[in-house]
């Protein structure tokens, strides 16, 4: 009976993981409608005649929310199918003992080619499973962010599907590569779990790192030299802006506004439509960010305390 309930629960979790991204997507339509309503509330005011307002209205009116229409239907369903399949493999794959008892070139590579090593193949499977989990957690985080920023297209779901599959394959390659440096008999299970999750979170980082290390070792391709540390551009933290609390900063980061350089180039009406902040507050924050970008972090304090200038609108700047 306990085995029966375990199968039921595992199946329900797999279905939930496959359906969760679809449920998140449905929310975008109501979010866009709310943004339109907020902007339209300014129609009777003089600000509605500004170019920024017209650009904001054009932007909102041309947002195409993700839904199960003709353009999105197949990408979303294909993505959900891959998630469902990998979820089912996560919960039920380890029970396919006959699959691990036969030599598999993906799970075993050259290890055990003379004789099947079931334990080794199961270890490779575990790494792949945790790579899927890491990739799934990452894509949920990114999908919510992209929906919140109206940045979802049909190709988005193909991209995330591709990322899930690549993460599992890269994790397998990394697992086999580690056997060159570590003795598999003493490799702790925790290392396989952490390795798989880390690769799932950023598979592209591991691919590029392995590639550059290999090219450097073989001296095949030198590539472009990295810039000196002192030549890197300075990131102006959004916390330099007066009046922004931690809650404000976190909310702006949800809109992919993480520093002064980004905030300085924003349309205040779009932020107004997508948040609960007043339009005057947003304009003040943007004008402070523009001053910070122009004068730099070191001079900003002097402008505020000695010249009494806190934004680009004040006289004397």
Image (cartoon, helix red, strand yellow):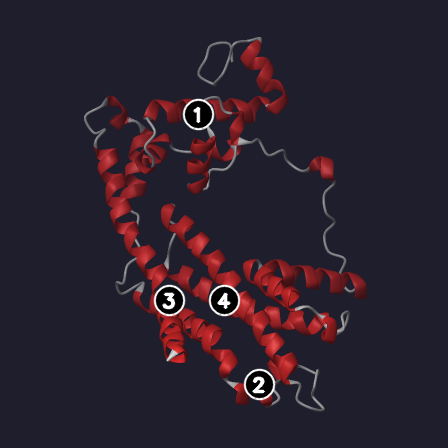
Residue beneath disc 3: 18
Pinpoint residue 266: horizontal percent, then vertical percent.
Answer: 42, 33
Circle 1 residue: 285
Which mark is first along the chain, 1 or 4? 4
Q: Are marks 3 and 2 in contact (CB under 8 Å)?
A: no
Mark 1 closeness class: few <14, some 14–19, many ≥20 residues within 10 Å = many
Residue at the far front in the pictured view: 1
Earlier-in-chain disc, 3 versus 2: 3
Residue at 37%, 67% (x, y): give it: 18
Query: In the image, which is nearer the foreground, mark 3 or mark 1?
Result: 3
Residue at the left extreme? 44
| Secondary element at tag 4 | helix
Q: Quarter of the image holding residue 250?
A: top left
Please provide percent x and percent y for residue 282: 38, 27
First in residue order: circle 2 vs circle 4: 2
Q: Give the residue at mark 4.
A: 164
The first of marks 3 and 4 along the sequence is 3
Q: Is residue 38 visible?
A: yes
Q: Secondary structure at mark 3?
A: helix
Counting residues from the N terminus, which is met first, the one under dot 3 or under dot 1?
3
In this orientation, which residue lies closer to the viewer: 203 or 14? Answer: 14
Q: How many marks?
A: 4
Q: Is residue 293 left or right of residue 35?
A: right
Q: Is residue 112 left or right of residue 54?
A: right
Q: Is residue 246 above or below residue 123?
A: above
- Judging by the rendered image, the residue that carries numbered circle 2 is 100
29 or 287, which lies in front?
Answer: 29
Q: Nearer the viewer, residue 211 or 30?
A: 30
Element under label 1?
Answer: helix
Which one is in front in this view, the residue at disc 3 or the one at disc 4? 3
* Disc 2 packing (10 Å; few <14; some 14–19; many ≥20): many
């Amino acid at each position: 009976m306990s085995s029966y309930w375990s199968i039921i629960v595992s199946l329900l979790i797999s279905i939930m993981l496959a359906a969760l991204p679809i449920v998140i997507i449905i929310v975008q339509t109501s979010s866009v409608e709310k943004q339109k309503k907020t902007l339209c509330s300014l129609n009777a005011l003089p600000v509605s005649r500004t170019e920024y307002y017209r650009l904001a209205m054009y932007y909102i009116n041309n947002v195409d929310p993700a839904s199960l229409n003709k353009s999105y239907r197949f990408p979303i369903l294909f993505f959900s199918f891959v998630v469902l399949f990998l979820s089912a493999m996560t919960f039920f794959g380890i029970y396919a003992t006959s699959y691990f008892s036969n030599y598999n070139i993906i799970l075993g590579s050259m290890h055990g080619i003379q004789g099947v090593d079931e334990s080794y193949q199961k270890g490779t499977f575990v790494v792949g499973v945790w790579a899927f989990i890491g990739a799934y957690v990452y894509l949920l985080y990114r999908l919510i962010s992209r929906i919140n920023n109206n940045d979802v297209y049909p190709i988005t779901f193909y991209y995330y599907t591709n990322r899930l599959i690549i993460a599992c394959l890269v994790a397998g390659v990394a697992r086999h590569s580690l056997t060159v440096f570590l003795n598999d008999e003493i490799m702790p299970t925790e290392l396989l779990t952490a390795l798989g999750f880390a690769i799932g979170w950023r598979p592209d980082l591991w691919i590029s790192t392995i590639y550059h290390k290999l090219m450097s070792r073989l001296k095949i391709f030198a590539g472009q030299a990295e810039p000196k540390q002192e030549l890197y551009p300075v990131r102006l933290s959004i916390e330099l802006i007066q009046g922004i609390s931690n809650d404000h900063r976190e909310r702006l980061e949800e809109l992919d506004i993480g520093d002064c350089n980004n905030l300085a180039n924003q349309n205040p009406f779009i932020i107004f439509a997508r948040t609960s902040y007043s339009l005057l507050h947003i304009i003040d924050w943007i004008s402070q960010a523009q001053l910070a970008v122009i004068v730099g972090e070191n001079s900003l304090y002097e402008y505020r305390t000695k010249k009494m200038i806190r934004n680009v609108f004040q006289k004397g700047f």
